[in-house]
Image: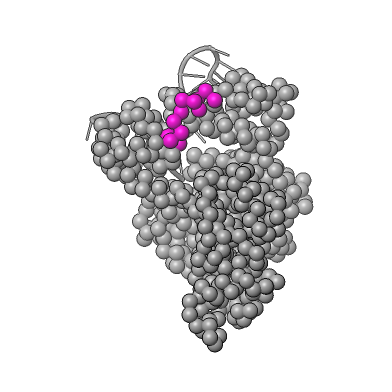
DNA sequence: GCCGTTTTCGGCCCGACTGTTTTCAGTCG
């Protein structure tokens, strides 16, 4: 959907901006490139087509110089400014920039004053107590940086599930076309949908080992190591895009799929029970698993029947009560993409989104949604262009016009209101009452203690106009643990006040997490799977749906699985108002 | 580098927090 050329050059602009900010003492020149990147990303037309018509300079943030850069890139594929900087810019500085608390200015000081160009050098300098010698750094920051480096190292080997999926997809496409390969399947943590992973596990079905020779001759993977695992299965490990790839070679079908999907606790629990109940099979589970690999099951459903239980979807195979449920044949029908009927929590250009309201509406129609809930940022989110009263009025009127223009979709008008430190919402009640719905989210003052933060959320949840709680913990996967809250108290209060909890679908958030989904479901709280969309790419709920499935949710548990008619009634009745 | 009822230079989204300072720069949301 996104124009690939636009995306590529926007990415180059972003990198250029970063390099300028660090190498030069002019952050405004950097900002200019960043702004241009935003403009380009939000375009609906191909940037080079605009360039060929000489229309670039009419775009916001694109002047004479940047326009020339773009045109040249379109013709030659070379972006001069980027190439020039790339040659002199130490790549390791980008890693340092990822450490919390270190921005461009500080990284620049480290580079220019201490010659630090990588995480390793930075660590060394901290240990030698050299940071305290430069302005802006002291013993405390030196200590904090050391602990951030430790965290960085731990996190570095992991990838977001979304990235790992893309890597897996790329490799599977290539492998499938090798001679003699019948099938390649995703297994392991990624098939069970863990939020992040340190490797991609694949299962390849092929006659003979010709595929290994092809793989080696085509240099598909680096650092290849071939061995056989504890079950005697041929195992090929290597790296691709700096990510570990682990391939098992199997002739069989469902047995291997089951064993290598895991989780270990799920597989072991099932096998243990089977062994205990079978005469003469007592002993290690290894021989049993070896035998399982050689058995001829039609599919995994048949395999689970062999264990005397019903099929368990991969997402549930974590040892969280799924085996008991499968014994009773009461594994629920998990939510799927087709159950989703509409979306809430979408931003527009009026705050910090990159699509205008009308474009959002048209995109949602294209995507087959029956309703869309607009929610820009509220007034105290200055940094995100939060809506002042006059902007609110403008948007309210525009929504009315669009409702007339696009009767094929229901448009709900809402707001993502900041939950202020005292737990109050952002506007006075006379304004709050005019919205169709209100998402309350915490965006600032993240470092309150657990008790105060919990009380803050509880107060917001008790507010009659609040519809749902946005990204309840504020976590950013692999980057920031959420603020500490008493989740039980939050969910209990949400239940009492009939509030909805958001499952923020952004692959970096996935907040509330799958365990939280499960608890919410047990309490009978609706979960709304929300895109928190800022860009055209954000409108898919793929990772949110996977998280919801892992959290045992069915269509009946999900707010935005309501049909258009049913949602209309709910929005009229506003059950969250008590 | 871009932009302009603050037009060809001098600004550039606002405010809290933190660790560094001893009056503030840098980071983050």
Q: In which quarter of the image is the N terminus of chain A?
A: top right
Looking at the picture, does residue A500 appear above or below residue A397?
Answer: below
The residue at the point 66 percent across, 67 percent down is A253
**Left or right, B19 with reference to A503:** left
Residue A255's x, y, as percent?
62, 70
The residue at the point 65 percent across, 71 percent down is A300
The residue at the point 63 percent across, 79 percent down is A306
Q: Main secondary structure of the magenta part?
A: helix
**Left or right, A456 with reference to A400:** left
Highlighted range, magenta: A83-94
Residue A265's x, y, as percent?
49, 71
Q: Is residue A103 visible?
A: no
Judged from this view, the residue extending furthest toward the bottom is A279
Residue A560's x, y, as percent?
65, 60
> Does the segment drawn in magenta span residue A360?
no
The residue at the point 48 percent across, 69 percent down is A492
**Left or right, A6 with reference to A148:** right
> Does the segment drawn in magenta span residue A90?
yes
Closest to the observer, A540 or A214: A214
Closest to the observer, A112 or A515: A112
Looking at the picture, does residue A503 appear above or below residue A297?
Answer: above
Closest to the observer, A259 or A466: A259
Q: Quadrant of residue A574?
A: bottom right
């Amino acid at each position: 959907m996104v124009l690939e050329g636009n995306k590529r050059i926007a990415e180059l602009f972003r990198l250029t901006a970063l390099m300028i900010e660090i190498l030069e003492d002019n952050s405004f020149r950097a900002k200019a490139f960043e702004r241009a990147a935003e403009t380009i990303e939000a375009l609906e037309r191909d940037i080079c087509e605009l360039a060929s018509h000489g229309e670039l300079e009419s775009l916001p943030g694109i002047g004479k110089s940047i326009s020339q850069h773009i045109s040249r890139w379109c013709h030659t594929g070379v972006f001069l400014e980027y190439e020039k900087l790339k040659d002199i810019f130490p790549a390791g500085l980008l890693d340092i920039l990822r450490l919390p608390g270190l921005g461009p200015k500080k990284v620049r000081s480290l580079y220019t004053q201490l010659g630090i160009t990588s995480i390793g050098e930075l660590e060394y300098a901290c240990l030698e107590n050299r940071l305290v010698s430069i302005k802006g750094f002291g013993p405390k920051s030196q200590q904090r940086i050391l602990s951030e480096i430790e965290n960085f190292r731990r996190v570095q080997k992991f990838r977001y599930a979304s990235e790992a999926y893309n890597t897996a997809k790329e490799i599977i496409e290539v492998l499938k076309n090798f001679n003699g390969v019948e099938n390649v399947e995703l297994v392991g943590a990624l098939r069970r949908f863990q939020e992040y992973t340190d490797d991609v596990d694949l299962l390849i079905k092929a006659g003979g080992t010709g595929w290994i020779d092809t793989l080696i001759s085509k240099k598909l993977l680096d650092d290849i190591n071939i061995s056989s695992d504890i079950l005697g299965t041929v195992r090929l490990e290597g790296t691709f895009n700096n990510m570990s790839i682990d391939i098992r070679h199997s002739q069989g079908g469902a047995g291997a799929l089951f064993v290598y999907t895991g989780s270990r606790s799920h597989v072991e629990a099932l096998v243990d029970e089977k062994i205990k109940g079978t005469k003469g099979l007592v002993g290690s589970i290894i021989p049993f698993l070896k035998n399982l690999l050689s058995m001829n099951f039609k599919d995994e459903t048949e395999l689970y029947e062999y264990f005397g239980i019903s099929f368990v979807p991969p997402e549930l195979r974590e040892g969280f009560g799924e085996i008991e449920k499968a014994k009773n044949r009461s594994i629920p029908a998990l939510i799927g993409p087709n159950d989703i009927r509409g979306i809430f929590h979408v931003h527009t250009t009026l705050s910090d989104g990159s699509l205008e309201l009308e474009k959002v509406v048209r995109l949602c129609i294209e995507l087959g949604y029956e309703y869309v809930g607009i929610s820009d940022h509220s007034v105290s989110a200055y940094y995100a262009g939060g809506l002042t009263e006059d902007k609110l009025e403008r948007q309210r009127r525009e929504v009315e016009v669009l409702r007339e223009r696009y009767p094929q979709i229901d448009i709900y008008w809402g707001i993502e209101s900041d939950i202020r430190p005292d737990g109050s919402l952002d506007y006075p009640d006379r304004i709050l009452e005019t919205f169709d719905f209100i998402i309350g989210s915490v965006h600032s003052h993240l470092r309150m203690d657990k008790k105060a933060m919990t009380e803050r959320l509880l107060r917001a949840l008790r507010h009659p106009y609040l519809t749902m709680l946005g990204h309840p913990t504020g976590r950013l996967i692999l980057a920031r643990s959420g603020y500490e809250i008493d989740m039980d108290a939050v969910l209990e209060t949400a239940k009492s006040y009939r509030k909805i909890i958001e499952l923020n679908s952004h692959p970096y958030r996935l907040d509330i997490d799958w365990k939280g989904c499960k608890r919410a479901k047990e309490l009978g709280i609706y979960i709304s799977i929300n895109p928190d969309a800022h860009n055209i790419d954000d409108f898919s709920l793929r990772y949110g749906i996977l998280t919801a499935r892992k959290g045992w949710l069915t269509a009946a548990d999900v707010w935005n699985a309501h049909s258009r008619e049913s949602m209309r009634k709910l929005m009229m009745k506003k059950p969250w108002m008590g």
